[in-house]
Amino acid sequence: MPRYHVMLHAQLPDHLRLAGMERDGQFPRGFFVHRIVRAPNLPEAGFEAIALLQSESGFARIVENAGGVAPDIIVHDAERTRRGDADRVNESGYAFYLH
């Protein structure tokens, strides 16, 4: 089955204030994350990457901090790849951004 490198974008709920992540009075509004998945095609790769993210304990903590409201997640970019250390990429953290 082909391997895909997927970049996801999650937009956090407006009310969410992640502890310890405040910068100059602002809190993260979202994050980007990369995941490598195996899927039969590109659209399915997006679904697989989102499911993988949603299964992670770090994501579960974000949802818990948001009062049980999960962030909106979209596929920002995806491409078929032959290279990439899936374990290393899939264990990488989230790149948060301020709004």
Image (cartoon, rainbow, N blue to C red):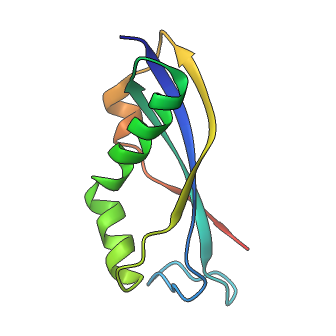
Q: Is 70 above or below relative to 14?
A: above
Q: Residue at x 48, y 9 (%)?
A: 82
- Camera-side residue of 21 and 17: 17
Quarter of the picture containing the N terminus is top left
Quarter of the picture containing the C terminus is bottom right
On the image, the x and y values in percent for residue 30 come to 60, 66
Residue farthest right in this picture: 99
On the image, the x and y values in percent for residue 27 come to 61, 81
Please state if 85 lies on the left or on the right of 27 as rendered.
Answer: left
Q: Is 45 above or below relative to 74?
A: above
Please state if 62 lies on the left or on the right of 21 as rendered.
Answer: left
- Camera-side residue of 75 and 56: 75
Number of numbered discs present?
Answer: 0
Indicate the quadrant where residue 25 lies.
Answer: bottom right
Indicate the quadrant where residue 76 lies.
Answer: top right
On the image, the x and y values in percent for residue 20 come to 46, 82
Q: Is 99 above or below relative to 47?
A: below
Please state if 55 lies on the left or on the right of 19 as rendered.
Answer: left
- Camera-side residue of 5 and 2: 2
Q: Residue at x 42, y 78 (%)?
A: 69
On the image, the x and y values in percent for residue 43 come to 53, 30
Q: Residue at x 55, y 79 (%)?
A: 13
Indicate the quadrant where residue 57 lies.
Answer: bottom left
Q: Residue at x 43, y 70 (%)?
A: 70
